[in-house]
Image (cartoon, rainbow, N blue to C red):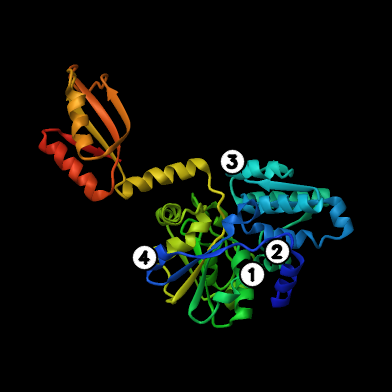
Amino acid sequence: MEPDFRDILLAQEKAKDIIHPTPLVPSSYFSRALGSEILLKLENLQETGSFKVRGAYNRLRQLTPQERERGVIAASAGNHAQGVAWASTRLGVKATIVMPEDVSIRKLLAVKEYGAEIILHGNRFDQAYARGLQVSQETGQLFIPAFADPLVIAGQGTIGLELSRSLDQETAIVVPVGGGGLISGIAVAAKGLSPSVRVIGVQTMSCPSAIRSLEEGKPVSVEPGPTIADGIAVNRPGDLNFSIIQDLVDEVVDVDEEAIAGAILSLLDKASIVAEGAGAAPLAALMEGRISTKSRRYVLIVSGGNLEINTMDRILHRGSIKMGRLLRIEVDLLDVPGSLWKLMGIVAQEKANILHIFHDRLHLEKPIQVTRVKLNLETRGHDHARELLEKLREAGYDVKQTV
């Protein structure tokens, strides 16, 4: 049974003292850059760092006494796991979570902190999902779907109610899509408030399951590829969710991994917002021109902020190189007093900041009297980096830029 607008209103009413509304903030930078008014719905500031607590709490609060006694089980790559673990703790219900073996360490540790029992199984969400169903049958624990459940969808739909002041025919809501729980809930709520509002979904090219399903006219499975947007790496949309997407969603597009990484960096650099891959996908789609629906105002759902520290570090370094803020060079010097000092003098004159320096006297490809020096330099952008390279080459250095 599909949830309706009244189900979402009830979910909001029952959770009003538990699930707090998240900020909807305008971004002047992205508005200028993209030529439309950009509003960011910050679900990364929600409990557990993700919107998933909304649906999990709405489902668990309606357990029967017998279901509470047996406990619940869920399968998730991370955010749904945290949502169920958090809600079960609030409601005093025992929870077991099945997670893929390669799950984000940050999300794994967070689920442990909420007190849930964890089972690691398989390398993908669908494998963890199948194991969760099996354990549910064996133990009698109620299985809590991540997205294909009307109560979960209604809980996620409360986000749409919080957007009520921004909804009209000039508005498009851009939502990350995995299994479809978030976008189906938001679509029901938003179009219930303003039928002319447009709802747009975004997937990663590594797992475009909803897009392929829309092309086929029915839910189909795809083979997921590696992605930093693990929160939307769901190989098949839910049947219930797909039906709502078909009826209410105006467009679903995909973006590649580099675009998502760039959007993560842009949100951090320009808006001081930490977003995980799924949460940055809506901005990536706009920045890459993937969305054909033109609107005066876009509301971007930043669905979560549970970004792995190591992933963030790689994105920051790669992004700094692309933006010209990090210049990596190699220079061969005669191993005599003053050689390194002279090189450093030019770097200092050009106002570049030395982040790392590696002095390699043992490089076997060079004569014994030659030392290879590797430098990581902080620069102010591509123009500044080019000026520095020109000065070094004018001084006679054979400079090699590395990535």
Image quadrant holding the N terminus, namely bottom right
Q: Does label 4 or label 1 sit earlier along the sequence?
A: 4
Q: In this figure, which residue is indicated by the disc labeled 1? A: 185
Q: Is residue 219 left or right of residue 322?
A: right
Give percent across and percent down for residue 266.
Answer: 41, 55
- As drawn, 243 above or below 176: below
Q: In this figure, which residue is indicated by the disc labeled 2? A: 152
Is mark 2 in CB contact (under 8 Å) with mark 3?
no
Amino acid type at image mark 1: Gly
Cα–Cα gap, marks 1 and 3: 29 Å
Amino acid type at image mark 3: Ile
> Few, some or many C-alpha atoms within 10 Å of disc 4 (few <14, some 14-19, many ≥20)?
few
Q: Does label 2 or label 3 sit earlier along the sequence?
A: 3
Give percent across and percent down for residue 351.
Answer: 24, 40
Q: Tag 2's secondary structure?
A: helix
- As drawn, 72 above or below 340: below
Q: Tag 1's secondary structure?
A: helix
Q: Does label 4 or label 2 sit earlier along the sequence?
A: 4
**Nearer the camera: disc 4 or disc 2:** 4
Cα–Cα gap, marks 2 and 1: 8 Å
Give percent across and percent down for residue 149.
Answer: 71, 65
Cα–Cα gap, marks 4 and 2: 35 Å
- As drawn, 85 above or below 222: above
Q: In this figure, which residue is indicated by the disc labeled 3? A: 105
> Few, some or many C-alpha atoms within 10 Å of disc 3 (few <14, some 14-19, many ≥20)?
few
Is mark 4 in CB contact (under 8 Å) with mark 1?
no
Amino acid type at image mark 2: Val
Residue in the image at 71% along x and 58% along y: 56
Q: In this figure, which residue is indicated by the disc labeled 4? A: 33
